[in-house]
Image (cartoon, rainbow, N blue to C red):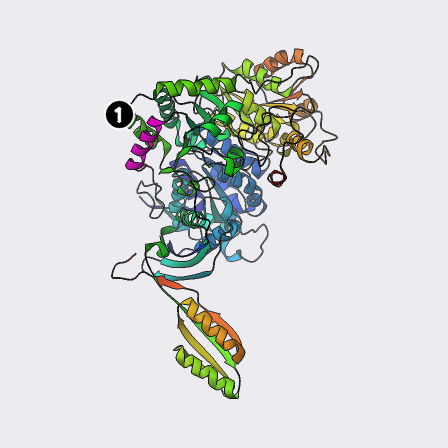
Amino acid sequence: MQQSQDIETHTISVLVDNEPGVLARVIGLFSGRGYNIDSLTVSETEHQKHQSRITVVTTGTPVVIEQIKNQLERLVPVHRVMDLTVMGQPLERELALIKVAGKGEKRVEALRLADAFRAQVIDATVEHFVFEITGRSKKVEQFVVLMEPLGLVEVARTGVASIMRGKNST
Amino acid sequence: MAREMTGAEIVIKALVDQGVDVIFGYPGGAVLPIYDVLFKQNKLRHVLVRHEQGAVHAAEGYARSTGKPGCVLVTSGPGATNAVTGLTDALMDSIPIVCLTGQVATHLIGNDAFQEADVVGITRPCTKHNYLVKDVNRLAKVMHEAFFVATNGRPGPVVVDIPKDVQFAAGKYAGPDNSGHKTYRPQKKGDQQAIRKAVDIISKAKRPVLYTGGGVINSGPVASKLLREFVKITGIPITSTLMGLGAYPASGKQWLGMLGMHGTYEANNAMHDCDVMINIGARFDDRITGRIDAFSPGSTKIHVDIDASSINKNIMVDLPIIGDCAFVLEEMIRIWKARSIPPDKKARAKWYNQIDEWRARDCLKFKSDKNVIMPQYAVQRLYELTKGKDTYISTEVGQHQMWAAQYYHFEEPNRWMTSGGLGTMGYGLPAAVGIQMAHPKSLVIDIAGEASVLMNMQELSTAIQYRLPIKVFILNNQYMGMVRQWQELLHGGRYSESYTEALPDFVKLAEAYGGVGIRAEKPDELDDAIKEMISVDKPVLFDCVVDRTANCFPMIPSGAAHNEMLLGDEGVKDGVSEEGKILV
């Protein structure tokens, strides 16, 4: 049987027991087996059940993506592995904090672009802004690139959080 | 009912409740409370090894020869790190092990305390799962869970790291319950539709071959029984990996011998030319497949495995069935019988004719010598002189291991213990200790090489202490034979560091330990020496001085396909491609 060698990007959501070391198990698996992590977010999402949701954006051939899911499935504290990219068009959002310093025309331009991208100013002096921007990773990426010539100082990004559309739980 | 005990008592109680009768271990500061409880009871036997690696291999030998989980108890820090090779070995070969490690007191964790190591961190990638128990009230539950995880689904090693203060603390004990696990629920029954489809494909096959592996052994004796029945009713020829030897009897008419890098000509050619391949409990390991893009190019592949991550990992298959092979085989047999479709007799006869042609090449023949013991001959004689007996075989790793697989023939499962996945030199002697503990009356032989066996030679002392009459049959060629063979094939005969100077006198070494040493140097003295070895009721080191430069054939050189086997020293020269050289 032949399989496609094309590299695909998938968003995988992993529901795990929030016990010590569970994140190390997941990332150890990725590094140990040579898989890619483009983005990783993790937080306890169901406090009563002590469950966390890990969202991993990864790339690989379809065979590798399949392997990643199977390998994740067999970790003992993993409840469920969901390939959101396969399940449909998931909602994906990322939040970034972006520090820009500058004066004069550059400063005005930065503010104008922030407005166009619906980024909020959450900290400012006469010499800098910190913008908060939310959106798909591409949008965040684009905004960061635009800020570069306007005095970009540094960026902090959360990584992708993702959920399926519609009323049902995954 | 829950009642109060110390952590150390909980550990021992849980082991006893899990049916453990032997534990292999080595004491140290961080496990003293557990050893104190061991001292005060008599339900659990402890075997004091001489090195923690030996403890894990002994537990593996115990597990593989009994089908029960093997148990290990070691101290913190170096005790645990010494166990890592054994744990990795058990992970690669899917052997159920529960390894208890002592840890420094909880308040000292992270302080670089004496004999502290991050054991859960170190063992995370080399165990199926591991636990650090910081609360004594969770200890009983974790202990039982460890056994569940180690033995269910694809088996593997589980580490439970227990800080010393938790061993002293008082807590509640609860016995095992059968409620299963909240997240770990491996799929045992295969998908019915897939199984029906498999039977359909198999019934139409003209040149089918069964390729079975360690999964059949791990599934238990029932799986081997079912496999034999399936082979009988379908009439399909069968080969097996190194790990699966014994599931189908080597004396069976449909047996092709082992496949893979040092497999038989008939097995590998059958794999290459078949039209339907039925893989049961094997994982398309690189020792099996040879060059991936030339692997069995024309076949429809069916793959039965309990671990979904084995599917399509190395080889894309047409029909995966995820489940325990005993369940799947039982269903396949039931459906096959209900349908009663006779196979295409003409095609099948043609296939067996072809197989007989391959068999006629007699790929395992070797040049015998009157003056020098050929290693193949030594294993042959060992087999002939022990085959009627209740025998268990373990091996070290290297040429002798392959010769054992080729020339020692297994009729039953769980009789063959060898480090397949990790290829751990030093495995066989401690494994023999574990096997003999489980089967005190049986004949337990470690077929060894003189280099490998020195890696865990200290365990001979364990064998002496517990009066375990293990037989260590050393094929002594003074070389790391497989390294030497590869240097000959790949590196222009530059034998870099593969010759061992200053080997010990194994006869004297055996005597120094309190065992018996036997040496055979000539073919005509071999039989009597082997008989003597069998009759001795003590551990034996048998120094079998063999031809120093014999190579292990057949061989699929790295980067070559199944039908490009080397059958002997002729043709070796241009045997390995440039791409092949980089492969191990």
Residue B199 lies in the magenta-colored region: yes
Is B110 or B393 nearer to us in this picture? B393
Question: Which quarter shows the C terminus of chain B?
Answer: top right
x, y percent for residue B216: 41, 30
Range drawn in magenta: B190-206
Q: Is residue B555 visible?
A: yes
x, y percent for residue B385: 55, 13
Question: Which quarter shows the N terminus of chain B?
Answer: top left
Residue B209, above or below B157 = above
Asked where in the image residue B310 lies, by quadrant, the reply is: top left
At label 1, counting other C-alpha atoms closer than 10 Å, the crowd grade (few under 14, some 14-19, many 20 or more) is few
Taking the image as shown, residue B572 lies to the left or right of residue B390, namely right
Is A7 or B524 nearer to us in this picture? A7
Label 1's element? helix
Is B186 or B65 nearer to us in this picture? B186
Residue B310 lies in the magenta-colored region: no
Give the prevailing secondary structure in the magenta stretch: helix
